[in-house]
Amino acid sequence: MKTYVQNQVKPFRMIGNIYYVGTDKFSCHMIDTGEGLILIDTGAEENAPMIVDSLSQLGYDVADVKYIVHSHGHFDHSHATAEIVRLSGAKTWLHKDDVQYLKGLFVPDHYTEHGDVLTLGNTRIEFIHAPGHTLGTVAFFFDVEENGVTYRAGMFGGAGVNQLKKGFLRRYGLSYFLRDMFFKTLEMLKNYQVDVPLGNHPYHTHTLKKAALAETAETNPFIDPQWWAPFMDKLGAKLREVLKEEAKEKFVNYAHRGASQYAPENTIMAFDLGLSMGANGIETDIQLTKDGVPVLFHDNTLARMTGKEGSVADYTYEELRWFWVEKGILRDRIPTLQAFLERYADKDITFALELKTPGTYKAVADAVRSFGIRLKTVVTSFNYEELLALRAYAPELSAGYLTKTTDEEILENMRRDGIDELCPKAEEITAEKVDAWHEMGFNVRAWGVADTALMERAYTAGVNGMTVNFPDELTALTKEN
């Protein structure tokens, strides 16, 4: 867990009955309802004594806290709650999808649902499910009165976009589709009128700067009715920029069946050559032998690459291992998936493992688990049913659908089934389509790159990766750009 250096700040009244009792990094807002206090978020565990002290400075007792509501479950918004509950007996609210982040520190008294309302004293808080930052993120809206005028206060509980980067999502086993949820949440929230924006981190709404201005300003700087909708647009633009930068910085040059333009495909010779040419990924095909051994081979029949009759499934591995895979004067043996991973699993490369025949998913998933390469592997197939079987057997693995055409039905099915890598044919790709696919939450990898012109077009469009037979030429292109 990342460590933050925090500083307690002098607590202050923002507007009406809303007070700030958080730190310079993590927000905690207090509402004095006249019949008890409500806290919005609490921060990390070490924040608890700071909040207690801040309440005391304002003349309140922690025992007056009746409810603690949470914008989401991340540690910097919820982990101080357990201690404050111990001191106050307050009831806690959190969306059920975010309980996983609590680490057992407390059990929520109420699981927040879209449209919930909490009423205490003079305050009525409306809860809106606003997923994206996490599955269980919520937004808050309530009225506050200042000098006889009623204003609408609002907080979007998950305004950060760094948690939607590919590395973060993969590391914590989260879906790329949180990005799609985030964009949809922003469009929804823009329809709300907010006069007093609250930040779930103080920097989001410049809380501490406004507090300093409030000491001398004639009008309350926390009243800013023009801020809300533009902020949602700003967040959307920021995430779009993150996705574009990520596609370039984390781009994967997959050696397609190895450097298959120059060496016998799906062989150790081809894989080694591809890596020597600058590839940072390997794409390969997996089939099962007659005795169930997963091996790397593409075609349904052996004839083109080995000159032998039949298919991989017609032979035991002991029989198959003596066949030569040839390209011109070069030849090499058919490797097993086990031997392949023993050679490459510890290297800093990404794997695209294609399921070529039905029933292969289990052996591939078991191998990925055994070698601990989940974070750098996507399992792909043209066979959608095989991907569904993979998702049921190993839901933690990233899955990619290889498709010759892309339409709304395909995309909707993929989102429904959690297949988060879209692998369209390169000739179908445009920059506009890639942008749209990224916003839907898909990682995008191009295949069928027949020549360097098509390669350059797909790369310029912003795809996340590409499988090519000539990784040396793709390496040269990426270095130029």
Image (cartoon, grey):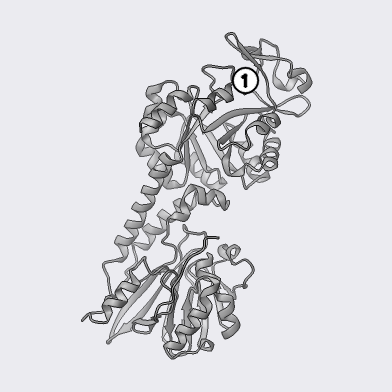
Q: Position of residue 465 (x, y in %)?
A: 47, 35
Q: Residue furthest left?
A: 218
The residue singled out by tag 1 in the image is 299
Q: Position of residue 126 (x, y in %)?
A: 44, 73
Residue 458 visible in the displayed image: no
Callout 1: 10 Å neighbours few (<14), some, many (20+)? Answer: few
Q: Residue furthest top?
A: 329
117 to 431, vertically: above or below: below
Locate residue 262 relative to residue 224 in the image: left or right.
right
13 to 135, vertically: above or below: below
Locate residue 300 relative to residue 112 in the image: left or right.
right
Q: Position of residue 438 (x, y in %)?
A: 42, 44
Mark 1 lies on a secondary structure that is loop
Q: Nearer the viewer, residue 207 or 112?
A: 207
Q: Nearer the viewer, residue 70 or 53?
A: 53
* Three-letter code, disc 1: Asp
Q: Quadrant of residue 275?
A: top right
* Quadrant of the rendering where the C terminus is positioned: top left
Q: Nearer the viewer, residue 443 or 432?
A: 443
364 to 137, vertically: above or below: above
